[in-house]
Image (tube, grey):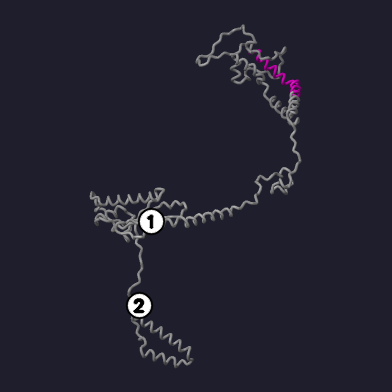
């Protein structure tokens, strides 16, 4: 681990030395100087201070703890105020003339130190100290070559040659007493059948006391409601309710009121059957949809009976309905009773002829008997429709 640490530290220090020479290498002096400057918060006027020549370098730079060099070195390229960035230049302008000269001298001195060979030796000493510290704190990582047993190894890693691929199986151990998902489905179906069997055996006989004889609808119940059920299965179409009624079956409606009702229902009217058909699936429960349709029919009947406007000037419009053409068999094509008797006699004679041919091989005798049969009461050669 010492070699990577040495390489990392050396790379960091070399990158730091690639900074141009005309840069500030010791910014702590200006930072210390900024910390000693007093500021007036929430003031719109700039800070003004009279020049005080009695201030010493200790007041300007503070007790930074850095030793002042006894002799300032000079680098190959001097650092001037033009090499400072705007923020540094602003801080530099706040200093007095003597402080500015001392600041530039320090910057040039540190630049010269970094250019000398002593900087490389100091860098090597720092890197050596970092390596020693890392060797003390970091322990070597060792991967022991311990293979898994055949029982602990997963199914997909049994034939794996790489030791890193021989891992334990993450699945839970198989329970021999468990059943498959298909068996669970069959068991659930069996439970459902048993539940309905218990309902048939114990609950259905109790419903006999609520049974009522069927009574066909009469004139007092002209509305016919139709529901859709899916035998206990949840379906979006199960809430739909359809109502049908004939306009002529509605009580207490005159012909003018009935025509007005037909105009009100519009395309929901079938002129061939005189049936109005409406549906509703707005609400969740079928009972709510039925109640809505019942109220709607009552409103239509009430509006049809309202004599304020009879809609006599509005013609009946049945363009929405296209009648289906029904083909009927023509009456003149149907068989008359005389023609039916003629066909029956011809069929009987044909049967007799076939029977005679199978009984006697002589064809002349069979033909003679056939002619005699036709002469006694056979069918006439004329065909009538």
Q: Is residue 10 left or right of residue 81?
A: right
Tag 1 secondary structure = strand
The boundaries of the magenta stretch are 100-125
Question: Residue 196 placed where, x, y %?
Answer: 49, 56
Q: Is residue 307 left or right of residue 80?
A: left
Taking the view exactly as shown, the residue that stands out farthest to the top is 54
Which residue is tagged 1?
A: 226
Q: Nearer the viewer, mark 1 or mark 2?
A: 1
Give the CA separation, mark 1 to mark 2. 44 Å
**Closer to the camera, 212 or 182?**
212
Picture residue at 63% right of the left edge, 10% below the top: 59
Q: Is residue 125 left or right of residue 85?
A: right
Asked which quadrant contains residue 22, the reply is: top right
Q: Which mark is residue 178?
A: none
Asked which quadrant contains residue 372, the reply is: bottom left
Q: Quadrant of the C terminus?
A: bottom left
Which residue is tagged 2?
A: 335
């Amino acid at each position: 681990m010492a070699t990577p640490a040495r390489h990392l530290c050396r790379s960091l220090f070399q990158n730091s030395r690639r900074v141009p020479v005309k840069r500030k290498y010791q910014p702590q002096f200006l930072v210390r100087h900024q910390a000693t400057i007093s500021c007036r918060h929430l003031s719109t006027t700039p800070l003004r201070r009279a020049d005080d020549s009695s201030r010493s370098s200790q007041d300007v730079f503070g007790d930074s703890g850095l030793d002042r060099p006894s002799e300032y070195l000079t680098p190959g390229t001097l650092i001037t105020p033009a090499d400072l960035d705007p923020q540094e230049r602003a801080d530099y302008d706040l200093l007095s003339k003597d402080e500015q000269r001392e600041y530039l001298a320090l910057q040039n001195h540190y630049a010269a130190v970094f250019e000398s060979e002593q900087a490389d030796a100091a860098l090597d000493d720092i890197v050596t100290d970092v390596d020693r510290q890392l060797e003390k704190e970091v322990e070597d990582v060792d991967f022991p070559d311990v293979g898994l047993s055949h029982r602990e190894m997963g199914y997909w890693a049994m034939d794996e040659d790489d030791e890193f691929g021989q891992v334990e199986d993450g699945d839970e151990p198989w329970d021999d007493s468990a059943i498959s998902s298909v068996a669970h489905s069959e068991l659930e179906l069996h439970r459902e059948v048993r539940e309905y069997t218990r309902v048939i055996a114990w609950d259905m006989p109790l419903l006999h006391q609520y049974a009522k004889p069927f009574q066909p609808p009469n004139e007092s119940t002209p509305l016919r409601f139709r529901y859709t059920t899916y035998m206990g299965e949840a379906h979006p179409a199960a809430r739909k309710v359809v109502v049908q009624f004939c306009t002529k079956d509605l009580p207490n409606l005159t012909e003018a009121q009935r025509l007005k009702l037909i105009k009100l229902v519009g395309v929901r009217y079938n002129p061939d059957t005189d049936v109005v058909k409406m549906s509703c699936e707005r609400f969740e429960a079928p009972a709510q949809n039925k109640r809505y349709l019942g109220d709607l029919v009552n409103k239509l009947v009430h509006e049809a009976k309202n004599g304020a406007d009879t809609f006599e000037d509005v013609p009946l419009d049945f363009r929405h309905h296209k009648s289906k053409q029904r083909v009927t068999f023509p009456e003149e094509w149907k068989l008359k009773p005389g023609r039916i008797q003629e066909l029956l006699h011809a069929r009987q004679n044909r049967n007799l002829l076939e029977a005679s041919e199978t009984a006697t091989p002589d064809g002349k005798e069979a033909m003679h008997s056939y002619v005699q049969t036709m002469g006694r009461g056979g069918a006439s050669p004329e065909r009538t429709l």
